[in-house]
Amino acid sequence: MIDTIAEKPIPLDLIPPEAIPGRGGKPVHQVTLSLWYRRGVRGVRLETIMIGGRRCTSIEALNRFYQAVSQARSPHPSHRLPADAAPSPRTGRDRSKAVRRAMDELGKRGAGV
């Protein structure tokens, strides 16, 4: 949770590019930030708050997000997130894609439905 007393809230569209380095030195796209707080990465969501109708985060929240995603990605068990950190629920689009892939695989195996 973002502590607005200890952390300075920054609107997502005003985050300095050096705080969110992208590939090839380019800044991370705003859509990527939206995905980070809505869907998350590897079960980790970027902390945000609404202030005056604008979605905000903080540099500290970004750092916590980077650390948690790195831990979730680590193959070493001591670096992984605790078991109670539940992954993000799948969206309807994710489920539809999974069903489509399964149907395609069944069709390739000759078990047409």
Image: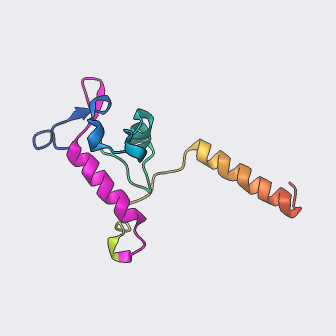
In the image, residue 101 sits, relative to residue 59, either above or below, namely below
**Residue 17 shown left or right of residue 34 in the figure:** left
For image coordinates 30% across by 37% down, the residue present is 17
Q: Is residue 71 magenta?
A: yes
Q: Residue at 37%, 57% (x, y): give it.
A: 69
Image quarter in which the C terminus is found: bottom right
- Locate residue 36, reporting x and y percent: 40, 44
**Residue toward you, 8 or 94:** 8
View extreme (front): residue: 24
Q: Is residue 1 visible?
A: no
Q: Is residue 64 visible?
A: yes
Q: Exactly how many numbered labels are in the figure? A: 0
- View extreme (bottom): residue: 77
Residue located at (43% from left, 72% from top)? 75
Q: Position of residue 82 (x, y in %)?
A: 34, 68
Q: Residue at 33% of width from left, 71% of height from top?
A: 79
User: Within the image, what quadrant is residue 56 found in?
Assistant: top left
Residue found farthest to the left: 5
Q: Position of residue 1 (x, y in %)?
A: 24, 47
Queried whether the magenta region covers residue 5, the answer comes back as no
Scheme of image coloration: rainbow
Tell me which corner region of the image, top left, top right, bottom left or bottom right, holds residue 54: top left
Residue 66 appears left or right of 109: left
What residue span does the magenta drawing correspond to?
48-77
For the residue pair 71 and 106, the one nearer the viewer reads as 71
Q: Position of residue 105 (x, y in %)?
A: 78, 59
